[in-house]
Image (cartoon, rainbow, N blue to C red):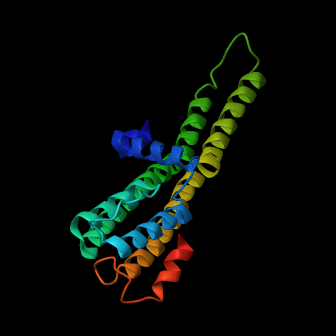
Amino acid sequence: MATMAREGWQDIGVAVSATFKLGQKGFEENATKAALARNVGAFNRLGHLSAEPIDPPDQSTQKLLNTYIRSGSIDAMMRLARTQRMEREIASVTATRAYETAGELAPVFGLVGTLVAITQLMPDMNQSSTDIVMASMAGAVLSTLYGVLSANLLFYPLARAIERRGDHEEAARSHLLEWFESELSDGRGNLAHNPRKIPEVRGAA
């Protein structure tokens, strides 16, 4: 609740969504590159307007491909790619920050639990003083322990996992985009002026 109060509902939703994505298949670079290579081959034969495009498995890459097909401009495609990357980075930073906040607050609320346990050191005619002290101390120790463990075994690891996955995905996307741009370096998707590129595209496909 404290994390939600600090970060807001929307950021918590982004963090939860990023957490579920950790258990899903990530960016499929090889399958996406194969689809793009087949598209480059079709553009070479027929041109980017006449070719029948093959949709890559990744939706973001589909949008980039469609932008290139509609505009015939590498610059337009790259502008969209930069926008997409910024949106993904913002989402990754938002999710990471939410879990880091939870990690910071967990030990604090463990201490709160310790203080609450200490307040239970009240005389009770039905219990001995030793029992009261032992019960309160047990509650205080467990509260602190749970706070520290949840921070270091749950919240911080999730933050780092989301960050690592985002970094790996961006590296793969950048590598693939550079390759695709190099194959469309003449601005028309035409490889006729560079025959040595054709075997490379066939190999990727």
Residue at (65, 46) in percent of width and height: 149
Residue at (67, 42) in percent of width and height: 145
Q: Quadrant of residue 88?
A: bottom left
Q: Position of residue 160 (x, y in %)?
A: 55, 59
Rendered view: 99 above or below 146: below
Furthest residue to the left? 71
Residue at (72, 26) in percent of width and height: 135
Q: Is residue 11 visible?
A: yes
Nearer to me, 175 or 156: 175
Q: Quadrant of residue 83?
A: bottom left
Q: Position of residue 190 (x, y in %)?
A: 34, 80
Q: Position of residue 22 (x, y in %)?
A: 56, 50
Nearer to me, 30 or 195: 195
Nearer to me, 140 or 103: 103
Furthest residue to the front? 45
Rendered view: 89 above or below 24: below
Nearer to me, 187 or 3: 187
Q: Position of residue 1 (x, y in %)?
A: 44, 35
Rendered view: 154 above or below 46: above
Q: How many marks?
A: 0
As drawn, is 186 to the left or to the right of 18?
Answer: left
Furthest residue to the top? 126
Q: Is residue 8 visible?
A: no
